[in-house]
Image (cartoon, rainbow, N blue to C red):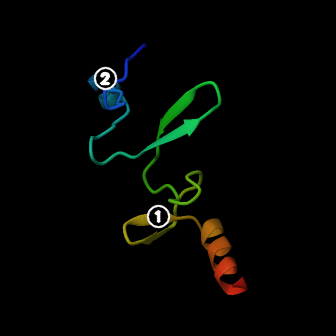
Amino acid sequence: MIKKLDSAGRVVIPQSLREKHNIIPEETELKIEDKGNYIKISKIPENTCAICLTRKGEIEYKDQFYCKKCIKELVSQVIDE
């Protein structure tokens, strides 16, 4: 599929793809990665760690989820300061 950017630099994700992948405007978060010669856009699964974006967030704090590994790293940095 080939899409063009609009004047504001946006790309529209077709409705058929939004429905297929349960992408809900104003709710679904997307991860945008620079892969060198291309840009990768992927849906972030619900309850994904807000820091690393790779693991399931097991602890919820202020409407965000965090995995235990990232929390341990944060705590160790605060204690070391």
Residue located at (67% from left, 71% from top): 73
Residue 16: percent from left, percent from top: 30, 22
Quarter of the rendering containing residue 5: top left
Identify residue for label 1.
65
Q: Which sits in the foreground, 44 or 32?
A: 32
Going by the image, does 34 lie left or right of 25?
right
Residue 8: percent from left, percent from top: 32, 32
Toward the front, the furthest residue is 7
SS category of the residue bearing label 1? strand
**How many circles with numbers are drawn on the protein?**
2
SS category of the residue bearing label 2? loop
For badge 2, the amino acid type reads Pro
Residue located at (68% from left, 77% from top): 77
Residue located at (33% from left, 36% from top): 22
Toward the top, the furthest residue is 2
Q: How far apart are marks 2 and 1 (CA)?
A: 29 Å
The vertical placement of 41 against 2, above or below, is below
Residue 62: percent from left, percent from top: 38, 72
Q: Which sits in the foreground, 8 or 66?
A: 8
Q: Looking at the image, tell me whether mark 2 or mark 1 is earlier in sequence order.
A: 2
Quarter of the rendering containing residue 39: top right
Give the quadrant of the N terminus.
top left
Disc assigned to residue 14: 2
Residue located at (64% from left, 79% from top): 75
For badge 1, the amino acid type reads Phe
Discs 2/1, front: 2
Residue 69: percent from left, percent from top: 65, 67
